[in-house]
Amino acid sequence: MTEDHIVSSRSAAEPMVVLSNVTKEFRVGKKTVTAVDHVDLTINRGEIFAIIGYSGAGKSTLVRLINGLESITSGSLTVNGFEVAGKRESQLREARTNIGMIFQQFNLMNSRTVAGNVEFPLKVAGWDKNKRAARVTELLEFVGLADKAKNYPDQLSGGQKQRVGIARALATSPSLLLADESTSALDPETTAEVLDLLKKVNHELGITVIVITHEMDVVSNIADRVAVMELGKVVESGNVYDVFSNPQTATAKRFVGTAVKTTPVGGEAAELKERHRGYLVNIEITEGNTSIGKVLSYLGSRNVSFNIVQGGLETLQGKSYGNLTLELIGDVISIDAAVAELKTVTRVQEVR
Amino acid sequence: MYTSEGKLLAANSVDWASFMPDKLVPALGETLYMVSFTMLIAGFLGLVVGLLLYTTRQGNILANRFVNIVLNVVVNIVRPIPFIILLAALGPLTSMVVGTRLGANAAIFAMVFGATFAIARIVEQNMVSIDPGVIEAARAMGASKMRILFTVMIPEALGPLILGYTFLVIGVVDMSAMAGYIGGGGLGKVALVDGYQRFNEIITWSVVAVIIILVQLIQLVGNMLARKVMRR
Ligand SMILES: Nc1ncnc2c1ncn2[C@@H]1O[C@H](COP(=O)(O)OP(=O)(O)O)[C@@H](O)[C@H]1O
Ligand SMILES: [Mg+2]
């Protein structure tokens, strides 16, 4: 039911963050580094949008342009209709209270208690003392750290620190949350906890979330849509399932490869052929493709038998995708017929 | 009394009943007066200069190449001058500003001059160790530069700053002893005039002992405060 609700609200697609032809250059000595290169991107209200890419792709720079921590070299970037480009620090301050941010290294103040850290943005926003105290209690309860209010950050685990970071980022009820590698310093179990909390932030509070990551897991876990970045450019973007069930660029393919086993190539393919004398093909599995099973079950009557050699299946946004490598055994003509039939229902590639 | 034998005798004896209340205690009072006033003034000025050295660095909140270079040059010129020479060199300026080259206030003037730049460097060096991520987080929350300076940077560096100041109080005690040489009074003068120049080693060493105790007490208090702030 909630799925339907989210889908329908997503189809309304009200743009929240809009980047048009955004470029960011850094001067390093006499050289110019283009960290963000003519990027067009729209992030809609209420969605969890992931930006994935390898280190140095320009993800952090891109996200820092959104809240004006870095100035835009050229192009236009609006948040809730507010143009960020060309604004002075003093003009950006107001806008920033409406954008929360969390960091890989948490960036909590060690000189303040957990409560003091969460209270800080409220002081910045000019809240009075009683309102602040009530809000801090409410936030710490939301992130499940009410009992740690009087502790100092260095007395907390990484996951707890990030939850304080989230409480702090949510303090002034922003409409947008930026998460830059917010789980990259955490172990897998804690990562899952923090991702669940981010989902809760999105679902219960309706806050739009932009997550920056180099981990495929993070994207497949929480994101609705994704942009793949490489050398400052967005090379692929769209619905998470669409992008990762059918990756177009080498970068996107490599990220998919970190989550599921993909079509074997090179040394891996040679090794498989060494071990399996039959004809090796790779078939793509996509959601709703029930015909593949049907085709496979008829292979026997066509004098072809098969073995499943390797493969991987994953679920993205409740839909499965992946690859299977099959060894087909039989005479050449029968195998050709079988492959032709498979090709009518899915993508088939010979393993060479 | 004035025979060579008598001198020797005087050099080895101290009339504690009169030395303590007439010389040592007032001298300690003068030293404390000079040190605390110097620390009050130079502590503040050094903090201002040190914060400017830090915040005008490239990429920091008040980044300003020109101001940063000028401050660095000034600090680098004044800091290496040995205090005893600075004291003499500042003589004319001191008499212009304070009205005299002698006495505790003249000494304080020269000490403030020397200590300000030393404190500035120590402040800067302790601030540099602040995690830039914390400052970035404060910026992301919409905090103003001044709020970041006073409610993020200084509290985050407070523990090391206290230790840095403690180190400098001890340096200023040292300066005050030298200031005694040019008529600044205090423990330094007693050690030099009543001890060293009259070959009375007992006096010299008793002053040294007082200075050691003073320094130990300062360090103890500094460590305690820093530990309290840093919670370890
Ligand atoms: N302040 C800066 N000055 C100079 N170059 C920078 C700066 N910040 C980032 N860069 C450069 O921009 C590129 C993108 O960096 P970044 O946005 O941090 O990538 P990512 O977050 O994807 O790892 C890198 O080549 C990096 O060296
Ligand atoms: Mg990064």
Image: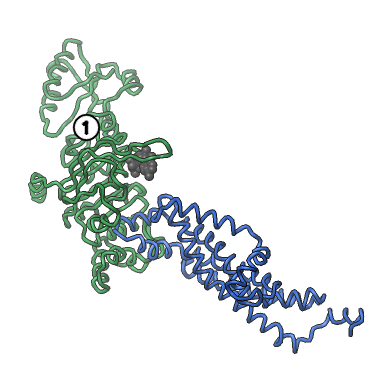
Chain colours: A green, B blue
Residue A55 in sight here: no
Count of numbered badges drawn on the protein: 1
| Residue B134 vs residue A207, the one in the foreground | B134
Q: Position of residue A240 (x, y in %)?
A: 19, 39
**Residue A208 % position (x, y):** 19, 51
Residue situated in front as seen by the camera: B140 or B174: B174
Quarter of the displayed picture in which ligand 1 can be seen: top left
Name the chain under label 1: A
Residue B46 shown left or right of residue B20 in the figure = left
Where residue B14 appears, x then y in whole percent? 79, 83
Mark 1: which secondary structure? strand
Q: Is residue B162 visible?
A: yes
Q: Read off the residue under disc 1.
A: A322
In the rendered view, tell whether residue A282 sits above or below residue A135.
Answer: above
Q: Where is residue A161? Give x, y as percent.
A: 35, 57
Find out if the beta carbon at label 1 lies less than 8 Å from the nearest ligand 1 atom.
Answer: no
Q: Residue at x 37, y 52 (%)?
A: A105
Q: Is residue A73 above or below residue B6?
A: above
The amino acid type of the residue labelled 1 equals: Gly
Left or right of residue A329: residue A11: left
Structural crowding at the residue carrying mark 1, measured as other residues with C-alpha within 10 Å and reported as few (<14), some (14–19) or many (≥20): many
Residue at (48, 57) in percent of width and height: B53
- Kindly indicate the quadrant of the structure image that contains residue A153: bottom left
